[in-house]
Amino acid sequence: MELNYDFHLHSCLSPCGDNDMTPYNLVNMAKIMGLDAIALTDHNTCLNCESAMKVGEKAGVLVIPGMELCTDEEVHVVCLFPTLENALAFSQYVRERIPPVENRPKIFGDQLIMDERDNVIGTENLLLTTAANVSLDKVPQIMKEFSGVAFPAHIDRSSYSVISNLGMIDEYMGFTTAEITSKADKNEYIKRYPVLEKMNILTSSDAHYLENIGSAGGKIDVDSSEIDKILSILAKS
């Protein structure tokens, strides 16, 4: 079966995410946009995933718990997990490895933790957009410890991407999947970086605003609409 997906979305917990990106709003906007499966991937945290998953169960949208990790090299990597428990464990692992820099909402934005009814139940005081003390080359192995799958985010962008920051992407990094933006020429990137021909290439929105959800138009073929089935595909090259 073919699923319409968007595996890179931010909620109001990301300081750069719009406050309208509440768990309820973003899941139901995904439904309006005809998406079958989404992943909530806030910066360096998974604390709004539980609420989004609960909303998804009622709305009929599969929500994969995830995170956009900022590595020590300031490379953004999308991390997806089979269960909420795995995601929250990794969230704590990363929180212990980000600098003790306090968020300043008036400068960086709010970092709101919400329940499934969009009630604010807390805030994250540590600034979530800083680089965690996690090296990019260690991410694939670390993800195995948390039963997850990770892939470099928006590799065609001029900042916070593996290519912009390291100048390359190759098979020795250990990733089986990579993400490009909808503006990238997939065939051109495969010519420039042949390793991509052996990898799964995803296109997601990286939406920080409701109107951008589903704008990338990604589709994936799976046996069934289950998180494990999706992650197993992304883990294979």
Image: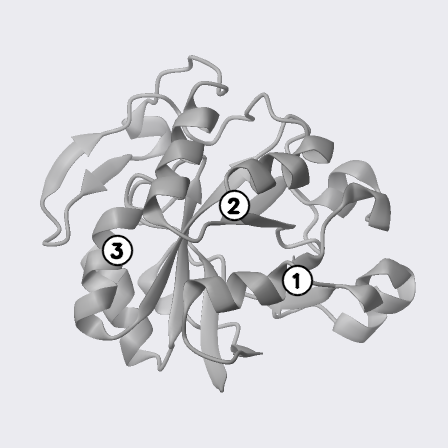
* 140 to the left or right of 196: left
Q: CA distance from mark 2 to mark 1?
A: 24 Å
- Sequence order check: which comes first, mark 2 or mark 1? 2
| Above-or-below relation of 81 to 186 | above
Residue at 46 percent of width and 80 percent of height? 3
Residue type at mark 2? Ser
Disc 3, SS:
helix
Q: Label 2: which residue?
A: 147
Where residue 210 appears, as percent x and y from the top left, is 32, 63
Q: CA distance from mark 1 to mark 3?
A: 24 Å
Disc 1, SS:
strand
Residue situated in front as seen by the camera: 55 or 228:
228
- Sequence order check: which comes first, mark 1 or mark 3? 3
Q: Label 3: which residue?
A: 52
Residue situated in front as seen by the camera: 96 or 12:
96
Asked where in the image residue 126 lies, by quadrant, the reply is top left
- Sequence order check: which comes first, mark 3 or mark 2? 3
Residue type at mark 1? Ile
Where residue 123 appears, as percent x and y from the top left, is 22, 30
Crowding near pointer 1: few (<14 within 10 Å), some, many (20+)? many
* 153 to the left or right of 3: right
Asked where in the image residue 119 lies, by quadrant, the reply is top left
Residue situated in front as seen by the camera: 170 or 109:
170
Where residue 177 appears, as percent x and y from the top left, is 68, 59
Residue at 52 percent of width and 45 percent of height? 147
Q: Label 1: which residue?
A: 180
Disc 2, SS:
loop
Of tags 3 and 2, which is closer to the observer? 2
Crowding near pointer 2: few (<14 within 10 Å), some, many (20+)? some
* 219 to the left or right of 174: left
Q: CA distance from mark 3 to mark 2?
A: 20 Å
